[in-house]
Amino acid sequence: MGSANTSPSKCHVLLPTAGTGSRLGGELPKQFQQLAGKPMLAYAVEAFLQSPLIESIWIGVSQGFIHNPILQSFSNSSKPIYFLPTGGPTRQETVRNTLAEMLKANLAPHDWVLVHDAARPGITPALIEKLISAVSASESGGLLAVPLADTLKKADLDSVVAGNVPHVEQTIPRDHLWQAQTPQMFALKQLHAALEDAIRLEADVTDEASAMELAGFKPLLIEGATRNFKVTHPADWDLMQFLLSSAGK
């Protein structure tokens, strides 16, 4: 990243997969449920394996899941894949814990880390390479995102609190508003430090970019794609199943 570095920065992937996926339901966490013929996590892993710019993949899982046989299906791969029992009670703690293990493994502090949601199986090698190409020349990091297309309405708080059907309180201009996606790409040591500070301050950070923003960085917004949406609700699952099945995967 900077002139003090003695070797080029490499790119690694971090997949936090310790969530339960409770809104989707099912016996397994959603990232391990079968989607169009394979565990949902497999689609993201395969996309990163297909990218020649990626050196290794690090997957943080809950301690109770680390010995699950389903993880063995990812063992035969063309690049190193590490499953670590680094899952925490929140996403940011899982990411922070996994980053700490990556630093302990002697990855270069200035190496890039691409943090990606396992629940975004629509990621493609082309999007990964677009992000890396745009961000690797910067020092601020960056993320995939899409400009908002829909009109935004703010609901009146009183109705929401009372559990009533809400009324429109305000229409929010969508100019300059983007919807964050993943991967989000930042320098390993800088991201670890930013998350450490955010967790210590009990700041409301919902992704890696917001932690970096809190630390004073201005991440780049790299336009992603609609297909890279997050699978959260049953309707999302059905749509992604259709998209992946239609693509012949």
Image (tube, grey):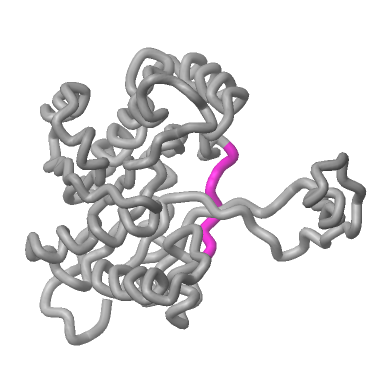
In the figure, is residue 234 to the left or right of 48? right
Residue 45 horizontal/vertical position (percent): 29, 36
For the question of whether residue 220 can be seen, the reply is no
Residue 16 horizontal/vertical position (percent): 33, 46
**Quick check: is 42 in the magenta stretch?**
no
Residue nearer the viewer, 41 or 202: 202
In the figure, is residue 113 to the left or right of 119? left
Q: Is residue 209 above or below residue 167?
A: below
> Residue visible at 27% across and 50% down?
13
Residue nearer the viewer, 133 or 243: 243
Q: Is residue 82 above or below residue 198?
A: above
The quadrant the C terminus occupies is top left
Quadrant assignment, res 190? bottom left
> Residue visible at 58% across and 30% down?
233
Quadrant assignment, res 239? top right
First to last magenta residue range:
221-226
In the figure, is residue 77 to the left or right of 115? left
The quadrant the N terminus occupies is bottom left
Residue 236 horizontal/vertical position (percent): 58, 28
For the question of whether residue 203 can be seen, the reply is yes
Quadrant assignment, res 173? bottom right
Q: Is residue 226 above or below residue 101?
A: above
Q: Residue furthest front?
A: 162
